[in-house]
Image (cartoon, grey):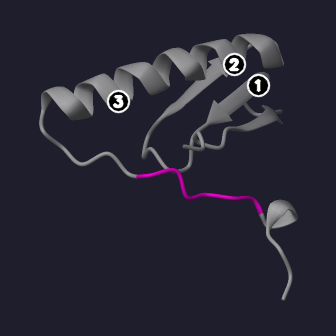
Amino acid sequence: MKDYHINLFYSEEDGGYIADIPDLPGCSAFGETPEEALREVLIAKQAWLESARAEGKPIPPPRYRPVVYQEVD
């Protein structure tokens, strides 16, 4: 099974790094460094998945792939 894609970028507006998982709505985190943002979004991912399971909500499969990784026909 492949895992969820994580976007990681610097936000001038927030003055730090943002990490998000597009396949899990609302799953994002902030950090002052890329490593901190990644660490925090992995914690948020676990919480998101545990909450969905506890509430009996569907868990979307990993599908998102940035355009740079998509094959061209």
Please state, as top left, top right, bottom left or bottom right, where the N terminus lies in the image: top right
The one of 71 and 43 positioned closer to us in this rendering: 71
Q: Is residue 47 above or below residue 56?
A: above
Q: Is residue 5 found left or right of 17 in the rendered image?
A: left
Residue on which the image places disc 1: 17
Residue on which the image places disc 3: 49
**Residue located 36% across and 29% down the image:** 48
Evaluate if marks 1 and 2 touch, with contact meaning CB atoms under 8 Å apart: yes
Spatial CA span between label 1 and label 2:
6 Å
**Secondary structure beneath disc 1?**
strand
Q: Nearer the viewer, mark 3 or mark 2?
A: 3
Comes first in the chain, label 1 or label 2:
1
Outermost bottom residue = 73
Circle 1: residue type? Tyr
Residue on which the image places disc 2: 37
Based on the displayed image, in which of its 4 quarters is residue 30 positioned?
Answer: top right
Evaluate if marks 1 and 3 touch, with contact meaning CB atoms under 8 Å apart: no
Dominant secondary structure of the residues highlighted in magenta in the image: loop
Please state, as top left, top right, bottom left or bottom right, where the C terminus lies in the image: bottom right
Does the magenta-highlighted stretch encompass residue 64? yes
Q: Position of residue 24 (x, y in %)?
A: 45, 44
Q: Is residue 18 found left or right of 52 in the rendered image?
A: right
Q: Nearer the viewer, mark 1 or mark 2?
A: 2
Does the magenta-highlighted stretch encompass residue 12? no
Circle 3: residue type? Leu
Find the magenta span and give its range: 61-66
